[in-house]
Amino acid sequence: MQVKAVLFDLFDTLLLIEKGEEFYEPSLKKLHETLARNGINVAFEDFKRIYFEVRDELYYKASENLEEPHFNIRISQTLKRLGYNLNSSNKVVAEATKAFANKFACYVRLDEDAPEILQKLHRKYKLGMVSNFAIPECIWDLLEKFDLKKFFDIVVISGEINRRKPSPEIFQKALRKLGVDSHEAVFVGDTPGLDIKGAKAIAMNAILIQRKTSTTDVPNSFIWRPPENNMEHKPDRIIKRLKELPEIMEDC
Ligand SMILES: [Mg+2]
């Protein structure tokens, strides 16, 4: 088989989120501070309680319909329940989302092998990125910050198209933009129930990056992931580091 394109997941594949969920409380505090500055007068603990209630309801819906409502909708719905009628396009809501995203970004670091490997693969294959994320503008900022944009021919973010992995549409959109068929592409990701399941369902080759041997890690709940049963969604190959990719690609 002639591989023409390699598609990557972003978080915990190319960019690593440090210290698990530690970013959540400080990021939410920054968001809350922004709202307070704009006249929203709610105690942080009350805001936090309602926020998680709304978030979990949205996650549940997303797991069923595979849609990805923008993070602004989450904030707008939280505020509505607290008696503030601000729609998702309100600039106060957008500013609050930005505050959250900026703090979150402080916890994100680049995988040390990523630039070299992307550079190598970019010479030989078309490269794409497909990410599930409700704040697309945060991803564009991170790609800029880590100077990764130059490696990718296309970037598809769930929050921009309202479809999330493992829906076939998000993968097909990426393939269409790259101009390759599914059997000519390889997907590399860290989450079997999203990356491997979705890629295999449309006949792409799938490589799982599994940096830790344990599969019982608590899923990162900011980036919603299905409960994992690793054996259920079998990748074609498993790697432990991105460095293994160029050689493995030869056998795909
Ligand atoms: Mg991931």
Image (tube, rainbow, N blue to C red):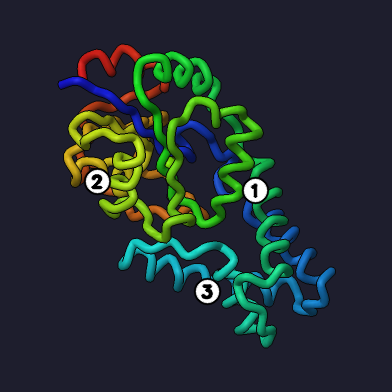
> Residue 93 location in percent, x, y?
68, 68
Q: The N terminus lies in which quarter of the figure?
A: top left
- Graded by Cα atoms within 10 Å as few (under 14), some (14 to 19) or many (20 or more), the crowding at tag 1 reads many
Q: How far apart are marks 1 and 2 (CA)?
A: 27 Å
> Residue 6 location in percent, x, y?
34, 28
Labels 2 and 3: the sequence-earlier one: 3
- Label of residue 155 in the image: none
Compared across the picture, whether 11 is left or right of 203 comes to right
Q: Which residue is drawn at 82% across and 77% down?
A: 39
Q: Which residue is drawn at 24% across and 26% down?
A: 237
Q: Which residue is identified by label 1?
A: 104
Labels 1 and 2: the sequence-earlier one: 1
Q: 129 or 209, which is in the foreground?
A: 129
Q: Which residue is identified by label 3?
A: 54
Labels 3 and 1: the sequence-earlier one: 3
Q: Residue at x 62, y 77 (%)?
A: 87
> Residue 183 location in percent, x, y?
18, 32
Q: Which residue is identified by label 2?
A: 197
Could you tell me which secondary element the residue under label 1 belongs to? helix
Q: Are marks 2 and 3 in contact (CB under 8 Å)?
A: no
